Amino acid sequence: MAKRKYHRRSDEELIAEYETKIRDLEHRVQAKERPDAVVIKELPKFRRQLAKFSPLCMDNQRPDLSNSILAFMCTFDVQAKHSPS
């Protein structure tokens, strides 16, 4: 078997990695401090329910409702990303 080659990260690579981790942590803290954090936390549950309801509409000959749900979900995602005034 051939020996494994190890790649030792340079100081610059380590610093860049830590800076990205710091940015991610800052974003997480900002997200928790939002006044609508409770609403944003419940959003995935709401999305799952809509995702289950949309195929049900298609299976029961209501593609208009299914399309409306999909459009609503897209609009909802965009609006949820913006913080309230």
Image (cartoon, rainbow, N blue to C red):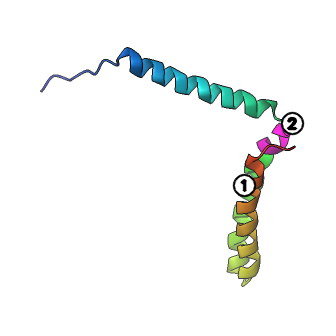
- Sequence-first tag of 2 and 1: 2
8 on left or right of 15: left
Q: Nearer the viewer, residue 74 or 53?
A: 74
Residue drawn at point x = 25 percent, y = 21 percent: 6
Q: CA distance from mark 2 to mark 1?
A: 17 Å
Residue 39 belongs to the span the image colors magenta: yes
Q: Which image quarter is the C terminus in?
A: top right
Q: Which image quarter is the N terminus in?
A: top left
Q: Quadrant of residue 76?
A: bottom right
Q: Nearer the viewer, residue 1 or 71?
A: 71
Q: Secondary structure at mark 2?
A: loop
Overall secondary structure of the magenta stretch?
helix
| Residue 41 placement (x, y as % from top left) | 78, 41
Q: Quadrant of residue 2?
A: top left
| Residue 83 placement (x, y as % from top left) | 80, 43
Q: Please name the residue that numbered disc 2 is placed on.
A: 35
Q: Please name the residue that numbered disc 1 is placed on.
A: 78
* Segment colored magenta: 36-41
| Residue 44 placement (x, y as % from top left) | 73, 49
Residue 45 belongs to the span the image colors magenta: no
Residue drawn at point x = 75 percent, y = 73 percent: 68
Residue drawn at point x = 64 percent, y = 26 percent: 25
| Category of crowding for the residue at label 1, using alpha-carbon neighbours closer than 10 angstroms: few (below 14), some (14–19), many (at least 20) | few
Q: Secondary structure at mark 1?
A: helix
Establish if 21 lies above or below 41: above
41 on left or right of 15: right
Query: Farthest residue toward the bottom?
Result: 61
Q: Amino acid at mark 2?
A: Pro
Residue drawn at point x = 60 percent, y = 27 percent: 23
Q: Amino acid at mark 1?
A: Val
Label for residue 50? none
| Category of crowding for the residue at label 2, using alpha-carbon neighbours closer than 10 angstroms: few (below 14), some (14–19), many (at least 20) | few
